[in-house]
Amino acid sequence: MLAWLILFAAVCHLIFAFQSHSIGGFLWKVLLAIIYGCAGVYMLMHPLLGVVSLTLLLAIFFVIEGLVEIVLYFNIRRERWMGFVRRDCHAHPWVSNMASLAV
């Protein structure tokens, strides 16, 4: 079930990529969708590897996803609408990404 959810997230990131207003944001979102897709397909193809391999795969997945999100944040922070994102949350988006890297 988790693999299907990750694949669904990959499709959502791909759809969001086509709504990006800059080529940099588009490319980073497509890269993130590919990472999500690879992780989801891998988990579907190898369901019997056990809990240990799933934990390791998810740890690697979250580290890569956190790094890509940090790079994406620094690429879009100069956008005009980014101020709304900063005002809507209590901390900057990179704080949650650093927490993902710590996991």
Image (cartoon, helix red, strand yellow):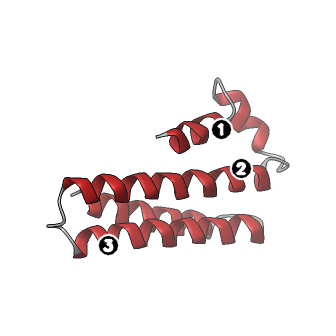
User: Residue drawn 59% across and 42% down?
Assistant: 97
Q: Quadrant of the N terminus?
A: bottom left
Q: In this rendering, would 96 be left or right of 51? A: right
Residue 54 placed where, x, y %? 27, 57
Q: Secondary structure at mark 3?
A: helix
Task: Identify residue type, mark 2.
Answer: Tyr
- What residue is shown with label 3? 42
CB atoms of marks 2 and 1 within 8 Å? yes
Q: First in sequence, mark 2 or 1: give its number.
A: 2
Q: Give the distance between the C-alpha atoms of the residues marked 1 and 3, in whole angstroms.
A: 28 Å
User: Residue drawn 54% across and 44% down?
Assistant: 101
* Image vertical order of residue 64 relative to residue 26, above or below: above
Query: What is the number of the mark on residue 93?
Result: 1
The residue at the far top in this view is 90
Task: Identify residue type, mark 3.
Answer: Tyr
Residue 55 placed where, x, y %? 31, 52
Q: First in sequence, mark 1 or 3: give its number.
A: 3
Packing grade of label 2 (10 A; few <14, some 14-19, many >=20) is some
Report the number of discs: 3
Packing grade of label 3 (10 A; few <14, some 14-19, many >=20) is few
